[in-house]
C-alpha cells in the first residue's frame, strides 16, 4: 500500500512559490463555503514518525483562516482522559459545524502502538479498527467531512532524518528512536489499519513525505478537493432504509382499523404497591446501603451512569431525588436534558452526552438522555427516518464503550398507566404549587401515547443488552417505583464491586 509513496517525487522551490499562493486562495474560499454550509471538517494527521506532520499542521495554520480552525494534539493521556473510555478525548474535541478540526494524532495512534508493541492481540486490534470504522461512519452520516492523511517515509529516509535531527539538536518525538527500531512492524500493522478503514465515505490519502514542498502541496490539494466535493454533495440526503416489520410509522393514517400492538410495557405489573411502613423501611435500608456503595465505588475508581426515561408525570424527578439523597453530593452530578443549545446542535447528537461521562469513581445521572433520538425526535418528526433508525446501533456502540471501560450503566423507564397519568395531570393543574410542572406539550404527548408506546418497545428490543439492560419500573405506585429504582442501584453497584 505504501510503494506509491516511495517514488521520490519532488517540488522545486520555484514550483512551490508559483503554486502555493493560488492554492491558499482556493483553500480560504472553500473554508468560507464550508463555514456557510455548516459542515464540520475533521483532518486526521497520522503517519510515520519523522515525516514532518508538525510542519504540515503549521502549514495548514498558515494557509487557512485561524478563526475557523482548531488543532488538537493527542500526546500523552491526561488523568481526565485515562478515567474515561478511550474515545471520550476525541468526542469532546470534535469541531462544531462550519469549523475545521485538525486531529494531530488521532483514534488510530494508540491501537497501532498497542499492536506493534504486542500489548493487544490481533483480535483486539481488529475489533478496535472496526470500532473506528463505525465511529467515522457515524460522523460522516451526520454530515461531517473527514480527511485522513497518512504521511509515509521509507525506512532509509526515516533513519536519515533521525540522524540529521540529532546532529542539529532538533526537538523530536520522545519515542521516535523507540518507534524507528520497530519500523517494519509499524508498516505491517499500519497498512492493515489503512486497509480496514479505507472506505468510500472516509478514504485514506497516503502522502509521500520525502520532499517537504511536494508533501505540503499534496496536502493542500487533497484538502481542497475533499472540501469541494463535500460542498457539491450538499446536506445529507435521507436514506431510504428498510424498516423491520415491528417498526411503526407515527402519524400515518391509512383509514383502516388496526389493533393496538402488544409491547413490553403491557407486561409491566402496574398493580404492585407498598404500604407506608414497607416503603419507609425498604427505602431507608436501600439508601443507607447505596451511600456506602457510592463511596466504595469512589475508592475503587468505578464510574457510574444512570439514565432516567419515562412518561410525563411518571415520577422521574422523585426517583432521582431519592437516589441523590443517599449519595454524597461530591460524588455525582445530575444532567437534565432539554432542547439542545446552539452549541449542542452544532455537533453530533451524542456529543453532549459524551462530554458528561463521569471520571473514575464518580456518577452522572441523566434526566432524559440520548434516547430522545429514538423517542421524542422519532415520534415528533424532529429526526429524519434514517437518523433515528441508525441511532439504535450508534447508541449500542456508545454504551458498549462505556461498559468495556468498566462503567456501571443503569437505564430506567418509569411506566404509568394512562389513567394514573391523567390523574396526576389533573392534580398538578389544580395545585398552584405544581402547575409549573404541567405544560401544553405534556398534553400533546399524551395524545400520541400509542406512537410513543411503539417507540419504547423498539427502543427496549434493540438497546437492552447484557452490558446495558433496561429496567422497566412499575410507576403507578410512587413508593414502589422509588424503592425499585433504589434497590436496582444497590444490586448493580454491589455486583460491580463484587459484593
Image: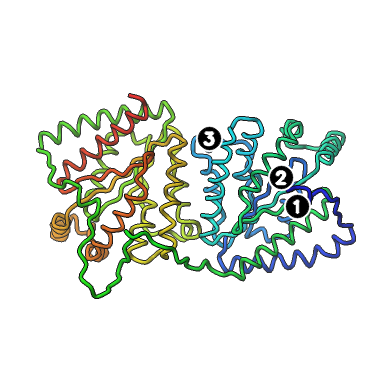
The answer to whether mark 2 and mark 1 are in CB contact below 8 A is: yes
User: Neighbour class for label 2 at 10 Å: few (<14), some, many (≥20)?
Assistant: many
Which of the labelled discs sits on residue 82, or is there none?
3
Question: At 22% from the left edge and 66% from the top edge, which residue is drawn?
Answer: 447
Q: CA distance from mark 3 to mark 1?
A: 32 Å
24 lies above or below 102: below
Name the secondary structure under disc 3: helix
428 lies above or below 209: below
Q: Quickly name the residue at label 2.
A: 47
User: Neighbour class for label 1 at 10 Å: few (<14), some, many (≥20)?
Assistant: many
Residue 203 percent coordinates (x, y): 64, 55
Give the mark toward the camera: 3 or 2.
Answer: 2
Image check: 156 left or right of 1? right
Which of the labelled discs sits on residue 50, or is there none?
none
Nearest to N terminus: mark 3 or mark 2: 2
Q: CA distance from mark 2 to mark 1?
A: 9 Å
Image check: 196 left or right of 447? right
Q: Nearer the viewer, residue 269 or 217?
A: 269
User: Neighbour class for label 3 at 10 Å: few (<14), some, many (≥20)?
Assistant: some
The answer to whether mark 3 and mark 2 are in CB contact below 8 A is: no
Amino acid at each position: 500500500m505504501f510503494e506509491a509513496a516511495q517514488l521520490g517525487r519532488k517540488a522545486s522551490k520555484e514550483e512551490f512559490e508559483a503554486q502555493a499562493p493560488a492554492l491558499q486562495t482556493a483553500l480560504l474560499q472553500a473554508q468560507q463555503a464550508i463555514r456557510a454550509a455548516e459542515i464540520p471538517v475533521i483532518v486526521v494527521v497520522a503517519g510515520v514518525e519523522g515525516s514532518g506532520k508538525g510542519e504540515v499542521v503549521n502549514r495548514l495554520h498558515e494557509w487557512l483562516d485561524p478563526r475557523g480552525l482548531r488543532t488538537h494534539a493527542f500526546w500523552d493521556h491526561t488523568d481526565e482522559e485515562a478515567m474515561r473510555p478511550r474515545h471520550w478525548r476525541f468526542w469532546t474535541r470534535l469541531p462544531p459545524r462550519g469549523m475545521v478540526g485538525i486531529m494531530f494524532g488521532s483514534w488510530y495512534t494508540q491501537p497501532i502502538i498497542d499492536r506493534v508493541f504486542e500489548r493487544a492481540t490481533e483480535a483486539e486490534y481488529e475489533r478496535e479498527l472496526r470500532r473506528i470504522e463505525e465511529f467515522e461512519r457515524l460522523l460522516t452520516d451526520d454530515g461531517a467531512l473527514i480527511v485522513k492523511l497518512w504521511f509515509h517515509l521509507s525506512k532509509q529516509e526515516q533513519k536519515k532524518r533521525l540522524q540529521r535531527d540529532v546532529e542539529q539538536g532538533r526537538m523530536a518525538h520522545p519515542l521516535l528512536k523507540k518507534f524507528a527500531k520497530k519500523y517494519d512492524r509499524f508498516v505491517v500493522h499500519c497498512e492493515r489499519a489503512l486497509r480496514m478503514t479505507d472506505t468510500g465515505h472516509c478514504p485514506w490519502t497516503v502522502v509521500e513525505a520525502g520532499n517537504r514542498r511536494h508533501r505540503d502541496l499534496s496536502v493542500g490539494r487533497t484538502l481542497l478537493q475533499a472540501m469541494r466535493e463535500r460542498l457539491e454533495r450538499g446536506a445529507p440526503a435521507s436514506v431510504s432504509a428498510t424498516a423491520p416489520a415491528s417498526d411503526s410509522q407515527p402519524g400515518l393514517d391509512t383509514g383502516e382499523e388496526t389493533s393496538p400492538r402488544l409491547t413490553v410495557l403491557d407486561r409491566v405489573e402496574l398493580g404492585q404497591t407498598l404500604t407506608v411502613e414497607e416503603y419507609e423501611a425498604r427505602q431507608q435500608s436501600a439508601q443507607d446501603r447505596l451511600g456506602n456503595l457510592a463511596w466504595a465505588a469512589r475508592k475503587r475508581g468505578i464510574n457510574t451512569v444512570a439514565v432516567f426515561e419515562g412518561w410525563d408525570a411518571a415520577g422521574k424527578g422523585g426517583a432521582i431525588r431519592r437516589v441523590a439523597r443517599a449519595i454524597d453530593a461530591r460524588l455525582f452530578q445530575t444532567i437534565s436534558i432539554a432542547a439542545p443549545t446552539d452549541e449542542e446542535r452544532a455537533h453530533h447528537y451524542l456529543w453532549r452526552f459524551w462530554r458528561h461521562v463521569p471520571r473514575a469513581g464518580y456518577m452522572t445521572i441523566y434526566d432524559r438522555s440520548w434516547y430522545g433520538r429514538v423517542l421524542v425526535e422519532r415520534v415528533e418528526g424532529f429526526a429524519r427516518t434514517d437518523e433515528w433508525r441508525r441511532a439504535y446501533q450508534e447508541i449500542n456502540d456508545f454504551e458498549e464503550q462505556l461498559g468495556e471501560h468498566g462503567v456501571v450503566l443503569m437505564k430506567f423507564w418509569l411506566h404509568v398507566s394512562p389513567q394514573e397519568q391523567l390523574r396526576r395531570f389533573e392534580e398538578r393543574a389544580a395545585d398552584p404549587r405544581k402547575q409549573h410542572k404541567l405544560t401544553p406539550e405534556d398534553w400533546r404527548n399524551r395524545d400520541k401515547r400509542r406512537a410513543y408506546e411503539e417507540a419504547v418497545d423498539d427502543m427496549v428490543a434493540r438497546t437492552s443488552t447484557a452490558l446495558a439492560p433496561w429496567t422497566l419500573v412499575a410507576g403507578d405506585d410512587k413508593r414502589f417505583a422509588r424503592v425499585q429504582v433504589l434497590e436496582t442501584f444497590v444490586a448493580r453497584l454491589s455486583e460491580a464491586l463484587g459484593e
